[in-house]
Image (tube, helix red, strand yellow):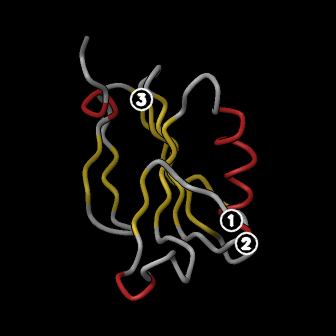
Amino acid sequence: MLQPDVLVARRSDVTDRNLSAAPVLAVEVLSPSTQRIDRFLKHSRYAAGGGEHYWIIDPAGPSLVAYVLSTTGTYDEVARVHGDETYAASAPFDVLITPTQLVAES
């Protein structure tokens, strides 16, 4: 069982114990110890499980890469933004995301 850092699911898929279907959106936030797992293992397993959308956030960039599940069952990259660039997502919902706004200033 995979556990993304953030997930978005349909209310009807949420049970008291788990999700009965793949999340609509799985988001992984990279760290040095997990980035290979997030970029490769989780990427392929979420696709195989039918996860419609997969986003990877790299706080070191900062950057965001967004993928959507294709009809062939693999992810197609639909957006790649860095720093102050903004991703205007229309799926799975409308949202504007700017990577620098996702990272706390120290």
Q: Is residue 66 visible?
A: no
Q: Amino acid at mark 1?
A: Ala
Percent of width and height locating residue 93: 31, 68
Q: Is residue 82 left or right of residue 66?
A: left
Percent of width and height locating residue 95: 26, 57
Q: Is residue 101 left or right of residue 27?
A: left
Percent of width and height locating residue 58: 49, 30
- Which one is earlier in the sequence, the residue at label 3 or at label 2? 2
Disc 3 + disc 2, Cβ < 8 Å? no
| Label 3 crowd bin: few (<14), some (14–19), many (20+), radius 10 Å | some
Q: Amino acid at mark 3?
A: His
Percent of width and height locating residue 97: 29, 44
Report the residue marked by disc 1.
47
Q: Which mark is residue 73?
A: 2
Residue shown at 55% from the left, 70% from the top: 52
State how far apart marks 3 and 2 are (Cα).
27 Å
State how far apart marks 1 and 2 are (Cα).
6 Å
User: Under tag 2, what secondary structure?
Assistant: loop
Please tell me whether mark 1 or mark 2 is closer to you in this view: 1
- Which one is earlier in the sequence, the residue at label 1 or at label 2? 1
Q: Which mark is residue 82?
A: 3
Residue shown at 43% from the left, 26% from the top: 59
Residue shown at 59% from the left, 52% from the top: 77
